[in-house]
Image (tube, coloured by chain):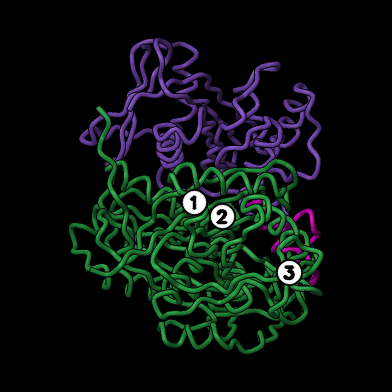
Amino acid sequence: MILKVIAATASGWPQAVAREEARVALAARGVRPRRMNRFAEIALAGALETCPPGQQTAAGSGVYLATRHGDARDTRHTVGDIQRERVLPMPVAFINLSGNMAGYHIAAALGVRGPNVSVSDERNPFLAALELAALDLESGAVPCALVGHVEERDDVAVSHWIMLASADAGGVLLTRQPRQIDASADDIAARIAGFFADPRGELLFGSAHAAWRLHAG
Amino acid sequence: MARPLVSVAVRAAEAVSAAGTEPDEILRFLRIPPPAPLVTLPEAGIEIPMRLAAAPDWNDAARLPRMAANVLARALEAAGLDRAQRERAALLVASSSMNVGAYEASERTAGTLALADQRNALAESLAEKFGLGGLRFSLNAACASGAAALLYGHRLIRDGAVEHAVIVGAEGLNQLTPAGFAALRLLAPANCTPFASGRQGMVLGEGAAVVVLGRGDDARWLLEGGAMNCDPHSPTASTPEAMSGVMEAAFERVQLDRRELVAVKVHGSGSDDSDRAEARALADTFSSSLPPLAGFKPMLGHTLGASAVLELVALMQSADAGWLPPAIGGGNADPALPMGDDLPAPVPADGRYLLNTFGFGGNNAALIMKRRKPR
């Protein structure tokens, strides 16, 4: 399987200012977040970086949001409010914790209607999301796949995204490797973005189950 | 050169829910469900009907993992996977609350669990306990989580990536979920009566279900495929067009003539907007001739991320026992809905079934199952 990397960006902000910085990034794109939680704003700000203004994303594209911990901060606050204050949650706060709402807001901003899933894995969620995106691309279920890794760590919030399509000639390519290769790497999405900006050599990454080679075609 | 596509069979299907665990017990419950018991939320303080798999214990952090493990143990035994097959099997866990109940319980008692660790905790514990060493995903697409897991499991097998995919749908007791739906005023005060006049909302449910998929076309039930889409119209409601669109996409992917369908397993949540949109979507998709409609939420409750897997298991078990529950709650469709006056009752038969799931975040999914003649 060979996929083409159309775009790859890496966004990250110190936790203390992550939401504010994400909003600045969104404002620069003319997006004023309404009724979104912190996690969704961070996810959306990063996702939009892969889609330059004026460039249309194919309507059937899928969104695959990888996260190890998800919107744990927002959830913890809402659960804490219920348990401490002994009240029902604010409706909007609950809606934002339902399912894959960050993915929904990305789909709404880009006008895409393909599959939209949040994918978690304890070891390497981005690889897991990439696997599902690859399945959809290979089967023709989607023309493009927006695959991202959004994580709120103790010190920094990251929102790294790549846009993939089935390969045609040239460009930065992602080629499936035999499973014997096990060259896992942390922050794979960020490293892909780095390679995309300066595509020299190759980048190998993967797990015991799936491995990939990133290279210039 | 294209790889030959393989068929995907259901090798085992087990579940626990308000209806119990044994097929006979489940069928009795589905035929004559008791009223949904009232449950009091511990801190939010409200009392709501819920379909729980066991008596509520708000301090039991191990409730969902234990429930899921028990079901998975039965399913793996029924599927007959040996140790090597388990080590290679993919595990896909579908849930929308992702074991937040464990965190809530911990906060009430010892305060030792970090919420961030709960997102993958179920998948990790199940994989370790049962030696499932292959690809592993926890999926969240709101109410369509289970359908997503089934579809990706299907595709992994169909493309030859894995031999078996273990699909777990799990939604456990927690306070956040019912408190949130209560805040949205989407819960019924008593029973869930989808598509009926005077329907008053959803009744939430709890459950865990496991479907083991494997290569082959020799099983009673095959998962033929399906489709998913996302409708960016509203965070809480998809349009009839998007719902109809996902059904059409499923028919196209599987090359199915919709007139072949034996029945449609509806989403049928009982909430006014959702039922209204779904009724419109069904009318648009099937023109003047709706196929028989079956539904499970009045009996099992709405089990959210687990619902697609749980209701698939319920569908297969019911159909194999010779009966399917009609989708219309209370027996008569709301005349304001475009469902017609004379809907045929669903009757199990060999052939194809459509299973729909429509959820928050615009997540919609349609699965196509095939029931074969036993050999």
Q: In which quarter of the image is residue A63?
A: top right
Q: For mark 2, what is the residue?
A: B144
The amino acid beneath tag 1 is Ala
Q: Residue at x 55, y 64 (%)?
A: B265
Q: Which of B254 and B273 is in front in this view?
A: B254
Q: Say yes or no: labels 2 and 3 on the same chain.
A: yes
Q: From the top left corner, tell me how far across and down residue B308 is, in percent.
A: 52, 62
Q: Residue at x 79, y 24 (%)?
A: A30
Tell me the crowding category of disc 3: few under 14, some 14 to 19, or many 20 or more residues within 10 angstroms, Cα based: many
Which chain does the green colour mark? B
Chain letter belonging to callout 2: B
Q: From the top left corner, tell me how far across and down residue A34 is, in percent.
A: 81, 40
Helix, strand, or loop for circle 3? helix
Q: Say yes or no: labels 2 and 1 on the same chain.
A: yes
- How much space separates mark 3 and mark 1, taking CA atoms? 26 Å
Q: From the top left corner, tell me how far across and down residue B286 is, in percent.
A: 62, 53
Q: From the top left corner, tell me how far across and down residue B37 is, in percent.
A: 66, 87
Does the residue at mark 2 contact the one at mark 1 (Cβ under 8 Å)? yes
Please tell me whether residue B96 is drawn above or below residue B151 in the rendered image: below
- How much space separates mark 2 and mark 1, taking CA atoms? 6 Å
Stretch of the chain drawn in magenta: A71-94
Q: For mark 1, what is the residue?
A: B148
Q: Which of B256 and A62 is in front in this view?
A: B256
Earlier along the polypeptide chain: callout 3 or callout 1? Answer: 1
- The colour applied to the residues of chain A in this rendering is purple
Tell me the crowding category of disc 2: few under 14, some 14 to 19, or many 20 or more residues within 10 angstroms, Cα based: many
Q: Say yes or no: labels 3 and 1 on the same chain.
A: yes
The amino acid beneath tag 3 is Ala
Drawn side of residue B180 relative to residue B151, left or right: right
